[in-house]
Image (tube, grey):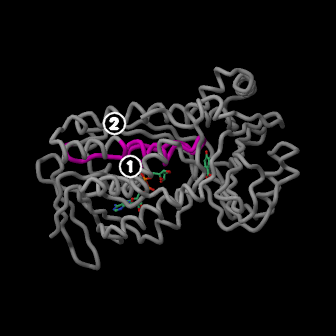
Amino acid sequence: MERTQVAIIGAGPAGLLLGQLLLRQGIDAVILERHTAAHVLGRIRAGVLEPGTVELITRAGCDRRLRAEGLLHGGVNLCFGGERHRIDLVGLTGGKQVTVYGQTEVTRDLMDARAAAGAVTHYEAEEVSLHDFDGPRPFLRFVRDGAERTLHCEFIAGCDGFHGISRPSVPESAMETFERVYPFGWLGLLADVPPVNEELIYVNHEDGFALCSMRSPTRSRYYLQCPAEERVENWSDERFWDELRRRLDPEAASRLTTGPALEKSIAPLRSFVTEPLRFGRLFLAGDAAHIVPPTGAKGLNLAASDVHYLSEALIEHFCDGSSAGLEAYSSRALARIWKAERFSWWMTSMMHRFPEVGRFGRRIQRAELEYLVSSRAAATALAENYVGLPY
Ligand code: APR
Ligand code: PHB
């Protein structure tokens, strides 16, 4: 039997960041993670951090490598009709930039800080189950090394992602969910080749969306829109590079450096929100509560803003004895979540090929893009969402 103040389920970026912010205020938190640390670090995810996310990682004391190795981007590019247009993030937002630094690296830095502080994480915690979170003394049961264990706590933070156990532990009648599944996926490729461009390029092409991103000056991350049911085995490296080159503007296409894929995978696109985010002493944060399609790179940033609200609320409770933040958590987090949901849905709608919209829909999409790159007001709306709305 073990006891802690906050039991966190999931050692993804949400759980680890929450653990670190609490630890810095002297609040004890134990993390239960289903997989090994190596498995968690093996997942390839997005890599664009809003300044607010960087600030939070700084507050958690985990920004040293991010500051040294992260790439500051003051602009982002949209390509359509074979032409590239730059959105000047710095100029349109009063000086804000995004930082390109992989989610895997954020996770590694948080894990290292947690290990250095001697905080407890039970990796390979199997069969985690949640109990009595509607009463004053919640607890978790789990199996580790074949033995059943119990973790008593004051609060449970469900940071266990979309396929976690926290959300399904709540009676369906107590929550409402909202969902949109998109009729396509993203085929991603990671390669040790220099990025085709210094800044990201989001491409709207007749044959589908493409994205040029990166992890460092020597490592690129590229994506192609593909049918939802597509199989990665159908895509040789050569086919991927040929298709990407075809979707880029001629100048970028001529500069594309290709190389063997380190990783290739297909991800579905989905929008999903659960309401509310609090059930007694259980709080949901990150992908456990919501999913955004990756266009706009809001997934990790949204997990970070949830954790900002939740950590402040828990600190207020444990340090000042006030439950006001805990009472407000769900509505404060959801207000920002829905704005990021809207932005991610809008970017997805504007940049992808939707078979069902027909010729009229395509002209509307084109008009929207042309308006965006010719109107300072429209470009500002994109820029302020891309760098992240205020907390
Ligand atoms: N018991 C214990 N741990 C679990 C369980 C379970 N039943 N189910 C899931 N987990 C763990 C997963 O193994 C994973 O390590 O919870 C963690 C959740 O991490 P993420 O999926 O990374 O979610 P989150 O921390 O909310 O991060 C959100 O990361 O997933 C991306 O696109 C997402 O960028 C967004 C960000
Ligand atoms: C990525 O680098 O993986 C990435 C960047 C921007 C996005 C999505 C993914 O919008």
Q: Is residue 201 left or right of residue 12?
A: right
- Judging depth in this view, the residue of 210 and 327 nearest the camera is 327
Q: Is residue 173 left or right of residue 208?
A: left
Query: What residue sits right under mark 2 in the picture?
Result: 275
Please identify the quadrant where the N terminus is shown: bottom left
What is the number of callouts on the image? Answer: 2
Q: Is residue 297 magenta?
A: yes
- Judging depth in this view, the residue of 231 and 30 nearest the camera is 30
Q: Amino acid at mark 2?
A: Glu
Query: What residue sits right under mark 1 in the picture?
Result: 288
Cβ(mark 1) to ligand 1 < 8 Å? yes
| Residue 365, label in figure | none
Residue 319 coordinates in the image, percent (x, y): 19, 46
User: What residue do we see at 69% from left, 25% from top?
Assistant: 372
Residue 336 coordinates in the image, percent (x, y): 42, 33
SS class, disc 2 = strand
User: What residue do we see at 21% from left, 61% from top?
Assistant: 140
Q: Which residues are magenta?
A: 280-308
Label 1 Cα crowd, 10 Å radius (few <14 / some 14-19 / many 20+): many
Question: Is residue 18 shown above or below 263?
Answer: above
Lower sequence index among marks 1 and 2: 2
CA gap, disc 1 and disc 2: 11 Å
Residue 119 coordinates in the image, percent (x, y): 30, 67
Residue 238 coordinates in the image, percent (x, y): 80, 63
SS class, disc 1 = helix
Q: Does residue 126 appear in the picture of this structure? A: no
Please identify the quadrant where the C terminus is shown: top left
Q: Amino acid at mark 1?
A: Ala
Q: Is residue 187 magenta?
A: no
Label 2 Cα crowd, 10 Å radius (few <14 / some 14-19 / many 20+): some
- Judging depth in this view, the residue of 219 and 55 nearest the camera is 55
